[in-house]
Image (cartoon, rainbow, N blue to C red):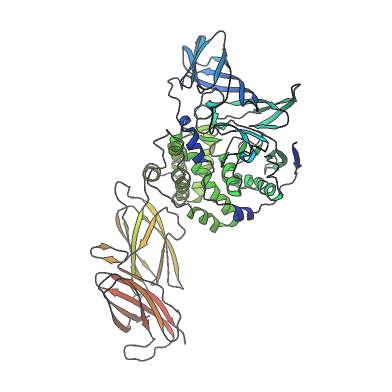
């Protein structure tokens, strides 16, 4: 029997569950399972009539026999002709299903090569409407892992049956005839599900009716009155624990949040975790605008697959951690409201939702949590975010490229254009493309319009290019002159191999001497580039992209006439500092090193020096006992320790004697 929990107040948010249970750096979808079992569906329809007609409405009626695993269907497709003299149409539908009849004033059809080709009863011109009905039956995708799955809760045959769908990218055609392309969103859809009366049947939109039939079945009807693409139409049928709460928006509107969870899963901690959704809706509403389907619902239904899927208004949940809940909810904006125009641009869905995870954690736990979540998404970047090959599930849903690097693209873009422009661009992008589809170029155009500058260079290198910038860098600062100024030089190389691009990016720098501090941004765009400027103090420490706004590798090195070798020469922080007695100054050298340790006072006068000689590349320490070249103890104060080497440059830092 179905059990009920009714919750009428919004629970306060807590992030404890994700910290205890969840690895947040995993894909939301069961990609490996999808890849192993229905790559055959991962291809767009090759028919020529894709733009000849526009689907406005699907009426999907399914009678599902759980015992025999046979689906009996009747689908009405309401379309408008987009061309003159339209005399035939084609619908995607796998050949393993049997089409019993097509109803349209005596229209004829054939079913071959995963297409139902229908000869209409006449010729239709632009704007003329027609309705075609298809009756069919069969077991969707005979055997194996399916876009339509018959199974059991927890994949345990001793538990209640579990029937569900996950149709992305092109699995809808495995269980209902449709125009299975993202670009043609139906204006609305009606789903009627007849099956065993003991089970709940969950789908998109709002529940219209539940009717008990005389044969111990139940017919459940859902209606979704927003535009929707085919792969987001879903069903989930099982024995569920159900609960609901009302969510109240800032503008005074309300909508139900509805949850269907296996009874064995519906423990108090899991129920509380799902109830975090209300707070997530408010957080994403602040960033992206009001929840897109506020006149209906948002829900989640547990299913047996290993990940989760952002079905419109009702996400299907296998993995159920806090991060996954946030990811699927974010998809309601990015993937459902605005959908990728084709699966070459799938990052428009997945990169946006993955980036939204970081925004969520930042809103809950602070800015450091945002940066930590992004920093964890370091990955293999040997191909492009744009997916040139969409012939397999694995090629489309590359976790490292589409999810992780796609999220990094947005993270980096935010830093390039600034917070105000970035978040204004997201809202403008939503407003322009809501209930439609969009490509990378569409998104780029919106951001360019809001920012007022060209971004071709950014999207070329990060979406269509491959690799990351591999920086090596060194810096030097002169001692303060008589006016207290220091000349600072920063040298940056990009050493990534061709044909990887030379990246143009802003690099954050922070320079300090312990008392003074300055932050600045340099725009690096060449394979080798020097930046020079004057500061009113002599910095002893420089950090390079400290907050990790760039997906990169970066190594500090020392200057040499023959290039830059990270094994040659680096200076590390002296300790103890301040000191009383002796200070140790660590440094690393390459082989056959000759250099000098020199101590200066703040007037720039040399007070001590000693030669350094090493034959082997290793880490060494220079020691200084606070005495000058004559063995006289020096007084308390700040001094400059510099290690220099001909051909290797010099490094310096401040040290303090405290007596």
Q: Is residue 82 left or right of residue 163?
A: left
Q: Using the image, determine if residue 86 lies above or below residue 165.
A: above
Q: Position of residue 554 (x, y in %)?
A: 38, 59
Could you tell me residue 327's position as x and y percent?
Answer: 56, 44
Outermost residue toward the front in this view = 158
Residue 604: where, in percent of width, then height? 33, 80
Instruction: Work out which quarter of the rendered image holds the N terminus and state it.
Output: top right
Residue at horizontal 44%, vertical 40%? 444
Q: Nearer the viewer, residue 215 or 633?
A: 215
588 w.r.t. 184: above or below: below
Q: Position of residue 513 (x, y in %)?
A: 43, 72
549 or 217, which lies in front?
217
Q: Residue at x 70, y 36 (%)?
A: 239
Camera-nearest residue between 263 and 330: 263
Residue at horizontal 65 percent and vertical 27 percent from the top: 67
Does residue 489 appear in this view? no
Camera-side residue: 444 or 336? 336
In the drawing, does residue 508 fall left or right of residue 77? left
């Amino acid at each position: 029997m179905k059990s009920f929990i009714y919750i009428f107040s919004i629970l306060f948010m807590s992030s404890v569950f994700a910290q205890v249970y969840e690895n947040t750096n995993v894909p939301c979808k069961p990609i490996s399972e999808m890849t192993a079992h229905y790559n055959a569906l991962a291809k767009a329809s090759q028919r020529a009539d894709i733009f000849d007609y526009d689907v406005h409405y699907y009426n999907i009626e399914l009678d599902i026999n759980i015992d025999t695993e046979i689906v009996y269907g009747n689908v009405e497709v309401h379309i408008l002709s987009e061309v003159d003299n339209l005399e035939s149409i084609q619908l995607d539908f796998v050949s393993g299903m049997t089409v019993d009849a097509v109803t349209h004033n005596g229209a004829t059809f054939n079913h071959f090569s995963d297409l139902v080709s229908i000869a209409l009863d006449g010729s239709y011109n632009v704007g003329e409407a027609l309705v075609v009905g298809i009756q069919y039956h069969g077991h969707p995708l005979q055997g194996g892992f399916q876009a339509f799955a018959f199974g059991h809760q927890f994949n345990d045959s001793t538990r209640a049956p579990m029937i569900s769908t996950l149709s992305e990218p092109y699995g809808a055609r495995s269980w209902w005839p449709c125009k299975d392309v993202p670009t043609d969103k139906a204006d609305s859809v009606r789903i009627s599900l007849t099956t065993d009366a003991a089970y709940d049947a969950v789908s998109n939109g709002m529940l219209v009716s539940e009717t008990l039939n005389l044969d111990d079945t139940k017919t459940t009807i859902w209606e979704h009155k927003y535009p929707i693409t085919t792969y987001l139409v879903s069903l989930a049928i099982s024995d569920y624990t159900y609960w609901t709460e009302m969510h109240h928006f800032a503008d005074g509107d309300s909508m139900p949040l509805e949850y269907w969870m296996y009874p064995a899963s519906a423990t108090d901690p899991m129920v509380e975790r799902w109830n975090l959704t209300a707070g997530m809706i408010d957080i994403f509403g602040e960033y992206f605008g009001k929840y897109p389907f506020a006149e209906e619902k948002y829900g989640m239904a547990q299913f047996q697959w290993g990940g989760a899927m952002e079905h419109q208004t009702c996400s299907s949940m296998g993995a159920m951690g806090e991060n996954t809940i946030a990811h699927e909810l974010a998809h309601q904006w990015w993937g459902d409201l605005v959908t990728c125009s084709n699966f070459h641009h799938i990052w428009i869905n997945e990169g946006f939702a993955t980036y939204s995870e970081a925004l969520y954690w930042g809103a809950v736990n602070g800015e450091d949590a945002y940066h930590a979540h992004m920093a964890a998404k370091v990955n293999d970047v040997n191909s492009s975010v744009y997916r040139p090959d969409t012939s397999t599930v694995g090629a489309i849903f590359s976790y490292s490229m589409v999810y992780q690097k796609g999220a990094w693209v947005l993270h980096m873009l935010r830093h390039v254009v600034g917070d105000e422009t970035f978040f204004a661009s997201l809202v403008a992008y939503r407003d322009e493309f809501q209930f439609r589809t969009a490509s990378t170029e569409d998104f780029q155009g919106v951001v360019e319009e809001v920012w007022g500058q060209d971004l071709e260079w950014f999207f070329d290198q990060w979406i269509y290019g491959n690799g990351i910038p591999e920086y090596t860098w060194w810096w030097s600062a002169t001692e303060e002159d008589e006016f207290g100024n220091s000349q600072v030089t920063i040298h940056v190389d990009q050493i990534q191999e061709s044909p990887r691009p030379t990246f143009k990016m802003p690099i954050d720098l922070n320079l300090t001497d312990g008392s003074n501090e300055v932050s600045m941004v340099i725009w690096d765009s060449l394979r080798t580039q020097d930046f020079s400027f004057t500061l009113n103090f002599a910095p002893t420490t420089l950090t390079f992209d400290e907050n990790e706004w760039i997906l990169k590798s970066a190594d500090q090195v020392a200057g040499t006439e023959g290039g830059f070798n990270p094994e040659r020469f680096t200076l590390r922080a002296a300790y103890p500092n301040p000191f009383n007695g002796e200070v140790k100054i660590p440094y690393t050298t390459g082989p056959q090193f000759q250099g000098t340790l020199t101590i200066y006072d703040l007037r720039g006068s040399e007070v001590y020096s000693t030669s350094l000689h090493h034959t082997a590349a290793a880490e060494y320490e220079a020691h200084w006992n606070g005495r000058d070249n004559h063995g006289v103890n020096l007084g308390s104060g700040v001094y400059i320790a510099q290690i220099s080497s001909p051909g290797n440059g010099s490094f310096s830092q401040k040290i303090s004697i405290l007596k």
